[in-house]
Amino acid sequence: MKYCQDGLRADDARARTVATHMNPIIDFINANRDRYLAELKTYLAIPSISALPEHAGDVRRCAEWTAAELTRIGLQNVRLEETPGHPIVYGEWLGAPDAPTMLFYGHYDVQPVDPVDLWESPPFEATIRDGEIYARGAADDKGQIFMHFKAIEAHLKTGRLPINVKVVLEGEEEVGSANLDDYIKAHKAQLAADVVVISDSPMFDRGIPSICYGLRGLAYFQIDLRGTASDLHSGSFGGAVANPAFVLAQILAGAKDKSGKIKIPGFYDKVRELAPEERAEFARLPFKEAKYRKDLGAPKLFGESGYTTLERVWGRPTFEVNGLLAGFTGEGAKTVIPAVAMAKISTRLVPDQDPDEIAKLIEAWLQKTAPKTVEVKLTKMHGGKPWMTSFDNKFVQAAARAIELGFRERPVFNREGGSIPVVSTFSEELGLPTVLFGIGLPDENAHAPNEKLDLSNFHNGVIASAHLYNELATAGA
Ligand code: BES
Ligand code: MN
Ligand code: MN
């Protein structure tokens, strides 16, 4: 792998020539900005929360809106592909027989909105304040996929696309994509392409666009402990039996040492150490740790010793407790020994860790650690493999040129701590490289109250995406 944050210089002259031929498309985009916002507001108004069964109808309505939009922008063979869960939306434009094919993936489902009282404007009434559009899904991921809808439209309404396009939009990404891998495996010929494009990640920072070349993987679990058949009076029985809440706390406390190292035997065996060159590149990025800490509201940052914050988030695995439930948590006091205790835990994984292998290690560790005084059950939930590409890949470089054309800033190359498990499926099942073309910002509150999208990034992103199709076509030719 080549580590180089400014590999674009040699292409500058070429990039300027391409820009001229793009003029009618850019003019179309600039002339349609207000319409884009009105349409995006309509899209963001559909509460497509995939996790909540009561919103299943809204998720479908959102799939239908998405499909209608794909038809409006000029795609063909648009359809809903039914799955055992929420539908996948498919559309294509294959009018450039000699050009490469881009497979565009994104998701139209969104996260739940709770705690809803913390929203400053209703999550499904998109509201513009200070150059940002606030709504659930604004950044993750409706706003970012809508940017591509408009870039595709700009090409098709002013002429033709320079590249063939296949669009796959999922309605179950936020709940672990249970049906996506099967769909991909069953439609290999239909999905054949040269490169995957995904816009579902933040850029490095405000004013610092980036191309992301690595994602962490994920393995998610629930741990259930049972101590007794029923809750017990803590006076009558306290001292005679183990308390599962306490046992759970002991087990979890044993998962890491004070320096943040994970103590599960074998956990680090497959971890690819960060290369010295890569650590040097991370260190060159304009990361402001004091501001980062302050923005997070953390009294002090904490992570695995021996690594910087960026290294910890991008290049090291984690073990986290996502939720804990046990005993009496209401107002006042109740003298009780709970019968059960539960924890949701997850690990973020880095190359070359494998979520199935990690699941086995965690199962073995739990069985060994849990005392005989409790029954313990580990349930595996969703997961996904980590991913990393070489950023001298020709499509990654093409994407970097497109970012520079759209944002007038040379992008940096970054990794991300989040997970998009389908990226490794595209690689393994279809043999495709992926380009992560994210235009969100790290502080846009994805999965949190007051999610938002910066509108100047959105508009620059539409222009960058329009350039992207050109640059990919040239790179792949
Ligand atoms: N858009 C995110 C993935 C992401 C987040 C990429 C941050 C890069 C940086 C995606 O919608 C998401 O939330 N993914 C889940 C994974 C999943 C299996 C539920 C995640 O990362 O927790
Ligand atoms: Mn997303
Ligand atoms: Mn998400």
Image (cartoon, rainbow, N blue to C red):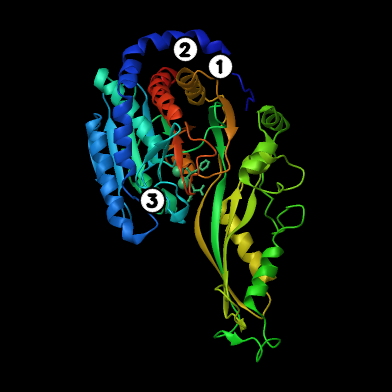
| Rendered image quadrant of residue 95 | top left
The answer to whether 79 is drawn above or below residue 406 in the figure is below
State how far apart marks 2 and 1 are (Cα). 10 Å
State how far apart marks 1 and 3 are (Cα). 36 Å
Question: Which residue is tagged 1?
Answer: 8
| Label of residue 15 in the image | 2
> Residue 444 in the image: x percent, y percent?
50, 40
- Name the residue type under label 1: Leu
The residue drawn where x is 36% and y is 14% is 22
Relative to 288, 85 lies left or right = left
State how far apart marks 2 and 3 are (Cα). 37 Å
> Is disc 1 placed on a helix, strand or loop?
loop
Q: Give the mark, 2 or 3, whose residue is nearer the N terminus.
A: 2
- Name the residue type under label 2: Ala
The residue drawn where x is 25% and y is 40% is 67
The residue drawn where x is 69% and y is 50% is 269
- Name the residue type under label 3: Glu
| Label of residue 172 in the image | 3
Which residue is more in the foreground, 244 or 457? 457
